[in-house]
Amino acid sequence: MTQTVWARVDDYLVRTLVVDADSEAARAANAAAGLPAIDVSATQGKLLNLLARTARARRVLEIGTLGGYSTLWLARAVGPKGQVITLEFQPHHAEVARANLDRAGVGDRVQIRVGAALESLPVLAEEGPEPFDLVFIDADKVNNANYVRWALRLTRPGAVIIVDNVVRDGGVADADSQDPAVRASREVIELFATEFAADATVIQTVGDKGWDGFVYAVVDGDPVE
């Protein structure tokens, strides 16, 4: 099996199960604005939506907005009375995301906070927000473990934490890798292996974006000190 075959399967699945004008418009707008094509795939966006709906999530925290493609799927999942707070480092990306979300009719349920996530998260925590039901982490990979620690602080028991891009074309199995993203993936997986407050697994994925995977974790209780 090759990536060409994976992409062909993805194309069939998208045309059959994930055809969506608003999300495709968002992807086109992102490309036109010069954003990197590193959004989740269409099938993965739909999966995020279904996972959030399965968890009956009404409060979602997203770390890494980019142009709001995944944000759009999550905003639909929380419904008109829900809220998504999404953190984005680049002001230009945030502007594109805002336009995409408003055009899709879900902008009123999404708050975009611009700045470094590791600066925004302590501010958010100081506000004493209601616990989040789901956290999606898809930002700079080297800080993933730090983002997970914050996610554990800001969620409730039973909440879901998803960390994208952890398999790295199989690189995650290489204990001697010097790739910072691979090392960060191993750090996150090993953190969950010892974190008594959450139970996790990793789902490997293939498709038009290649071979990768994500952590899926459920929060059990208070984080380990």
Image: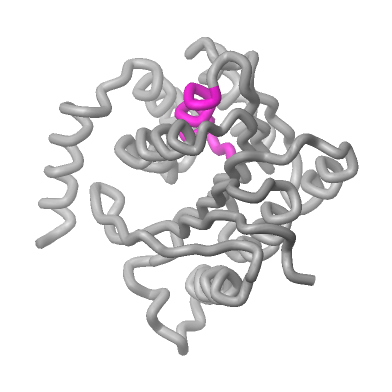
Q: Is residue 69 visible?
A: no
Q: Residue at x 56, y 33 (%)?
A: 57
Q: Residue furthest right?
A: 126
Across and down, in percent, residue 74 comes to: 50, 31
Residue 167 is drawn in which quadrant? Answer: bottom left
Q: Position of residue 94 (x, y in %)?
A: 63, 30
| Quadrant where the image shows the N terminus | bottom left
Tell me if residue 78 can be seen. yes
Is 167 located above or below residue 154 in the figure? below
The picture places residue 101, in percent across and down from the top left corner, at 54, 19
In this rendered view, identify the residue nearer to me: 31 or 178. Answer: 178
Q: Residue at x 60, y 55 (%)?
A: 219
Determine if the magenta segment contains residue 77: yes
Question: What residue is rendered at 73% in x and 47% in y?
Answer: 154
The vertical placement of 43 against 199, above or below, is: above
**Main SS class of the magenta portion in the image:** helix
Where residue 21 sits, quadrant-wise, is top left
Q: Position of residue 180 (x, y in %)?
A: 55, 73
Q: Which residues are magenta?
A: 65-78
